[in-house]
Image: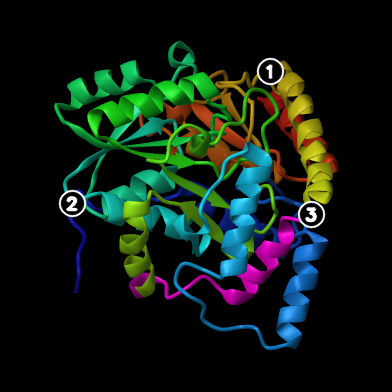
C-alpha cells in the first residue's frame, strides 16, 4: 500500500464537497442554486457541437499525436495572432486534457522534487495540491490591496526571505481565481523581467482570458517567449466537461512535455479537439454569454455589500466575487454548509483559496444565469437578516 508523506499530502477541495452535497439535495427535489464552482451555465458553442456531431458520425474518436491535432494547434496559433497580435509557431503548442493536465506537465517538465514554487494567496487550491503531490514546496505569497492583489517582484522577494529559500518557479493567474484580479501589461512585464533576471520559471495561467471586464488583458506571450502559458476551453468557451486545454511552451520544453504527455495522457480526446477547433469561430456567440456574466457582476458589486458581504478583492475578470463574511461568521466552511442546508444556495468557503485568512471569506461564482444569481442573492439577503 502506497502512503503519502506529509509534504505530499493534498488538502481537500471543499468546493467539490459542497457541490456533491448540492447535487444530492437537487436530486432529492430541493430548489438548489449552485454558485460553488466555475461552471458556465451556457452550452458549448453551436459550431463546437456541430463539429462533434460530424466527428461522431464519421467515427473520429481515437488517439492523436500527444501534442494534439495539427489543425487545432494552428487554430490556437491563429487565436494569438488575432487577439494578441503575436506570432506563435504551432510547434510550440501542446493540446492537453484540460488545463489540469497542463499544470501537471508544466510542473513535471520544469521542476525537481524539493524545488520551491510561488503562488498567490488567495489562489486556486489545485495549484497547491498538485505541487505538493509532486513533492514540490509551495511558497504562498499574500496578495492584498498593497500589492494590487497580484504577485510583484517585491512580494516575491519578501516571501523568499521569509521562507529562507530560492524560488525556482512563479505561477500567476490573470484574471485570477478567486480574486478576479487582472494583472496589467506593465505589472506583467515587471514580473516577467524579474523572473528572467533570477532564472525563475514563469508560468502564466490565462484560462479566464476572454472574461476581462476591467483592465488590460495581456498574454505573457506578448512580453516573453520564456514563459509557459496555459489556457483552456472550459471558461470563456463554455466547454468544461470536454476536458480540453493547451500550453504554449518555450522551444526547449516542447520535447520533454511531449514525452511526459505520451506516458501520462497519450493524447487529449480527439472528439474534444475537433470541437475545440470549431469553437474559435464562435466568438460572437460567446461574447453574448460574456454580457450575461457582466450583468451578474454589476449586480453583485452593488448588492453584496448592501447585504453585509463586502468585496474582499476586485472583480475585474473571471466570474467570481470573493467576499468578507466576518460580519456573520469566522468559519467559512460552517457558513457555506449552513447556507446550503437552510436556503439551498451553494458557494465555496474561502479556506480552499487561503488556508490562513480564508476562514472569513466566501467565493461566489456568477457564471450562472441572471435569474438564478438574482434569486440566490435574494435568499442570502433574507437568511442573513434572520441572523
For the residues carrying marks 3 and 1, which lies nearer the camera in this image? Answer: 3
Residue position marked by numbered label 2 in the rendering: 113
Mark 3 or mark 1: which comes first in sequence? 3
Q: Nearer the viewer, residue 77 or 66?
A: 77
Q: Residue at x 51, y 81 (%)?
A: 63
Dot 2 falls on a residue whose secondary structure is: loop
Secondary structure of the residue carrying numbered label 1? helix
In the depicted structure, whether residue 301 falls above or below residue 268? above
Exactly how many numbered labels are in the figure? 3
Report the mark closest to the observer, 1 or 2. 2
State the residue position of label 3: 282
Tag 2 or tag 1, which sits nearer the N-term? 2
For the point 75% across and 72% down, the residue is 51
Find residue 114 and report its horizontal and vertical position in percent: 16, 46
* Residue 247 relative to residue 137: left or right: right
Q: Mark 1 — residue?
A: 305
Image quadrant for the N terminus? bottom left
Q: CA distance from mark 1 to mark 2?
A: 44 Å
Relative placement, left or right, of 370 versus 115 is right
Q: Residues within 10 Å of mark 1 (few under 14, many from 20)?
A: few
**Residue at position x 46%, y 67% from top?**
67
| Whether residue 156 can be seen here | yes
Amino acid at each position: 500500500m502506497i502512503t503519502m508523506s506529509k509534504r505530499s499530502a493534498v488538502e481537500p477541495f471543499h468546493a467539490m464537497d459542497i457541490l456533491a452535497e448540492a447535487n444530492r439535495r437537487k436530486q432529492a427535489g430541493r430548489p438548489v442554486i449552485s454558485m460553488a464552482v466555475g461552471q458556465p451555465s451556457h452550452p458549448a458553442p453551436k459550431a463546437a457541437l456541430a463539429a462533434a456531431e460530424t466527428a461522431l458520425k464519421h467515427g473520429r474518436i481515437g488517439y492523436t499525436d500527444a501534442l494534439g491535432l495539427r489543425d487545432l494547434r494552428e487554430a490556437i496559433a491563429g487565436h494569438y495572432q488575432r487577439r494578441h497580435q503575436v506570432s506563435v509557431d504551432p510547434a510550440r503548442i501542446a493540446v492537453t486534457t484540460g488545463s489540469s493536465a497542463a499544470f501537471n506537465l508544466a510542473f513535471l517538465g520544469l521542476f525537481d522534487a524539493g524545488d520551491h514554487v510561488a503562488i498567490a494567496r488567495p489562489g486556486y487550491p489545485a495549484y497547491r495540491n498538485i505541487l505538493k503531490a509532486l513533492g514540490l514546496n509551495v511558497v504562498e505569497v499574500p496578495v492584498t490591496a498593497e500589492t494590487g492583489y497580484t504577485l510583484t517582484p517585491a512580494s516575491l522577494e519578501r516571501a523568499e526571505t521569509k521562507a529562507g529559500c530560492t524560488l525556482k518557479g512563479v505561477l500567476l493567474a490573470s484574471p485570477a481565481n478567486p480574486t478576479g484580479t487582472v494583472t496589467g501589461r506593465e505589472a506583467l512585464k515587471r514580473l516577467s523581467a524579474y523572473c528572467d533576471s533570477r532564472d525563475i520559471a514563469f508560468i502564466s495561467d490565462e484560462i479566464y482570458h476572454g472574461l476581462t471586464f476591467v483592465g488590460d488583458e495581456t498574454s505573457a506571450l506578448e512580453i516573453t517567449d520564456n514563459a509557459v502559458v496555459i489556457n483552456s476551453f472550459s471558461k470563456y468557451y463554455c466547454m468544461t466537461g470536454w476536458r480540453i486545454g493547451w500550453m504554449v511552451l518555450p522551444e526547449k520544453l516542447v520535447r520533454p512535455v511531449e514525452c511526459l504527455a505520451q506516458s501520462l495522457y497519450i493524447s487529449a480526446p480527439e472528439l474534444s479537439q475537433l470541437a475545440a477547433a470549431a469553437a474559435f469561430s464562435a466568438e460572437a456567440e460567446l461574447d453574448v454569454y460574456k454580457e450575461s456574466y457582466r450583468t451578474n457582476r454589476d449586480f453583485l458589486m452593488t448588492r453584496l455589500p448592501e447585504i453585509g458581504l463586502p468585496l474582499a478583492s476586485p472583480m475585474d475578470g473571471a466570474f467570481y466575487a470573493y467576499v468578507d463574511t466576518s460580519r456573520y461568521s469566522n468559519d467559512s466552511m460552517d457558513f457555506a454548509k449552513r447556507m446550503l442546508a437552510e436556503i439551498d444556495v451553494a458557494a465555496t468557503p474561502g479556506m480552499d483559496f487561503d488556508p490562513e485568512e480564508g476562514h472569513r471569506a466566501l467565493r461566489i461564482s456568477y457564471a450562472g444565469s441572471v435569474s438564478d444569481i438574482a434569486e440566490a442573492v435574494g435568499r442570502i439577503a433574507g437568511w442573513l437578516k434572520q441572523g
